[in-house]
Image (spheres, rainbow, N blue to C red):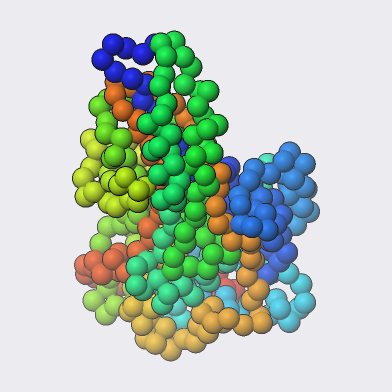
Amino acid sequence: MRLGPTGIYRFIVSLSICLLALTAQSTVFAGGGFGGNRAVGGVMIDANGIVRTATVAEKQDLANLMRVAVDAPEGDMKNASEMRMISLKSLQEAIVQSRKDGGPLPEAISFLAGLQRVEYVFVDTENHDIVIAGPAEPWKLLEDGSVVGTESGGAVLLLDDLIVAMRSVETARQGGISCSIEPTAEGRHRLQQLLKRIQLRPGQNPSIFEEPMKQAFGPQMIRLNGIREDSHLARTIVAADYEMKRIAMALTKSPVDGLPSYLQLAKNGQHSSAQNPRWWMACNYDALVRSEDGLAWKLSGQGVKTMTEQDIVAADGSVKGGGKVDKLAALWAEKMTENYQELAKHVTVFRDLRNAMDLTVVATLINQERLAKKAGLDLSLLLEENDTIELITYRAPKSVEPQCSFVRGRSGWVVTASGGVDINGFEVVERQKTDPTVGDLRISAIASDSNRWWWDR
């Protein structure tokens, strides 16, 4: 690599949290024991909240435990369904009965009968119930500890995440549920001072500056809002943020041909060292479809989109949103959104994130439209802290050591280290339209002669 006569090397530094797969599932959700500091999907969190990659032995330890704990689906649950209904009333009763029986929650309950998405919410006024519905599949355990559908390979929805989403509605009211992974102002300032001192000689390999740059930048801080920091749902959104930036900055190869890294798109571009792109993932739903009486609701849309903005870095290292969008960063965000469904087939955490958004929107809908009151249903078991349901907890992620990648450009140094996830269920629920056919579907969907907590249409 040589320094051209009219330009210098441009380094793109990506600093993100450690290995993606923070989202393995097991029977421990809403009642088990794999939490704390045990390796989960490839990571460990130490007593100080610093995330690190799990060792091979730690990953094997988790895989062995999961094989013992997770059973295959039984009976009719071995079959896929285009529309599986779950009664929240009967689900609560099944949880209480399981507790009385003295054993752990069955996988069928922990994995919400294999649901892949929530597409409908129905209010059953006659039976004082709320029914959620969507496609479902039997599940299987992958080698990394993920539990996915046998047909689509998509991550199953989790009771644990549903409960956390429902209990987070009020705390999220002031700004939604969000995650950001940010360098400190001190770290940015130290890096700026280092960059001013670096002079590359022709033919010099810029990788020799990787370690000094990492030390100057220091650890990034993980900030979570509107949600319990020690929950599985929180770790899901942190993991999704991390993996998005790893793909953007070519720290891991994109598994989708239509999604190159931002480094590939930005190579040889002109950039200012004071303006750096950030990306974040947000809700991406069509307007909610409702029946005229407000007893039937339909969710549709991809679920997740990627957005971008330029950060303005001041001399002291502080940052503020610039309100402007870099064309290449916007192009990458568009490609990420366009390829999200395909990407989620290869990287389970992105399906986990979409599941988290589905459940957050459903929880917000139930709260905002007072659906439990309309149904005459007591949801206190799911909504309130109690001794019947024990949610899995983890050490809350607090920070992560930086990682770096490099690319040759025409001018300047670009540091991109920020991003996040923003799940605002309130904005989704505010956009509604009426369609009487959804009400017709409700009549056939809630009709069941079964005493089970789930059934297929």
Residue 289 picture quarter:
bottom left
With respect to residue 279, does 361 lie above or below? below
With respect to residue 72, does 167 lie above or below? below
**Which quadrant is the N terminus positioned in?**
top left
What's the residue at 41%, 60% (across, down)?
A: 178
Question: Is residue 151 shown to the viewer in this render?
Answer: no
- Left or right, residue 23 beside residue 238: right
With respect to residue 335, does 10 lie above or below? above
Residue 415 picture quarter:
top left
User: Could you say which is closer to the camera, residue 332 or residue 151?
Assistant: 332
Number of disc labels: 0
User: Could you say which is closer to the camera, residue 41 or residue 368?
Assistant: 41
- Left or right, residue 99 beside residue 433: right
Estimate the x, y position of residue 302 in percent, counting from the top left. 35, 50
Question: Is residue 52 shown to the viewer in this render?
Answer: yes
Estimate the x, y position of residue 261 in percent, counting from the top left. 39, 30
- Left or right, residue 254 beside residue 146: left
User: Could you say which is closer to the camera, residue 124 or residue 69?
Assistant: 69
What's the residue at 47%, 59% (across, down)?
A: 223
What's the residue at 57%, 75% (across, down)?
A: 91
What's the residue at 33%, 50% (across, down)?
A: 319
Estimate the x, y position of residue 36 in percent, counting from the top left. 69, 61
With respect to residue 315, does 11 lie above or below? above
Estimate the x, y position of residue 57 in percent, counting from the top left. 77, 41
User: Could you say which is closer to the camera, residue 83 or residue 209?
Assistant: 209
